[in-house]
Image (cartoon, rainbow, N blue to C red):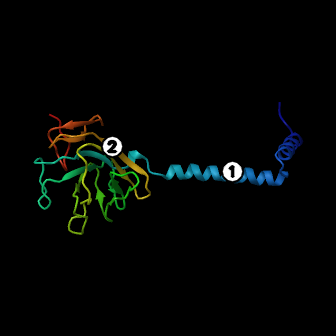
Amino acid sequence: MEQNSQDLSFENDFAAEKIGLPQKKLGIVIGAIALAVIAIVALVMLLPTRASMPVFSEVMTSNHAAYSHPDYGTVDWVEIYNPTEQDLDLSGYGFTNEIKRTFRYRFPDGTVLKSGEYLVLYCTGGTEASDADPYCTGFHLSADGEDLYLVNPNNVEADEVHVPALEADTSYAKNEQGVYAVTYVPTPGTANRFE
């Protein structure tokens, strides 16, 4: 059954009266709510999804002899991977092992990770990032296990991983199925291997 405009007007008057607002003010409130909902939906649609962000690929927290950096020796390291089909600008991204300090290490301006490319961060306790080597985090990782976080410049989480306690010279790496596992063949900067 169709309602005529007089019936709708009566219902609007009744609703406005019931909540204590004049009908014109009720219309303004409803309009404001509708605009707020549209703005929130638009904002959510503009936010990057995890599918368009870099990921943790491999982590080594107890490097004794598996890999030696020419300047820092056998330091811990974290490998970041770009699984997307486009290059990713990591300028301003943050990496941390402390959820309350998400920008403990900040990727420098101009850091671009090409599609399918890997980037290694060196977790050096006393060495901060510099122009000479911008990928030193300035903090170590714990061999007893910990959570690692990667966030975009707006502090939106791109990826996180719980790294378990690791034996010396083993790494925690993501396999082809996207599942993390311990590997005895660390491969910093290249595709992960499991043997």
166 to 38, vertically: above or below = above
Q: Quadrant of the N terminus?
A: top right
> Helix or strand or loop: what does disc 2 sit on?
strand
Q: Identify the residue position indicated by label 2 in the image.
A: 161
Residue at 52% x, 49% y is: 44
Where's residue 93, x and y in %? Answer: 36, 58
Kind of element beneath mark 1: helix
- Disc number for residue 121: none
Q: Residue at x 44, y 51 (%)?
A: 48
Task: Tell me the residue that label 1 is attached to.
Answer: 33
Viewer-proximal residue, 28 or 78? 78
Q: Nearer the viewer, residue 78 or 87?
A: 78
Residue 142 percent coordinates (x, y): 25, 48
Q: Amino acid at mark 2?
A: Val
Disc 1 + disc 2, Cβ < 8 Å? no
Q: Residues within 10 Å of mark 2 (few under 14, many from 20)?
A: some
Identify the residue at horizontal 30%, vertical 59% (top origin): 112
Instruction: Report the number of discs.
Output: 2
Quadrant location of the C terminus in the rendered image: top left
Looking at the picture, does residue 184 appear above or below residue 32? above
Q: Nearer the viewer, mark 1 or mark 2?
A: 2
Judging depth in this view, the residue of 98 and 56 nearest the camera is: 98
Q: Residue 145 in the image: state x and y as whole percent.
A: 27, 43
Q: Mark 1 is on which residue type?
A: Ile
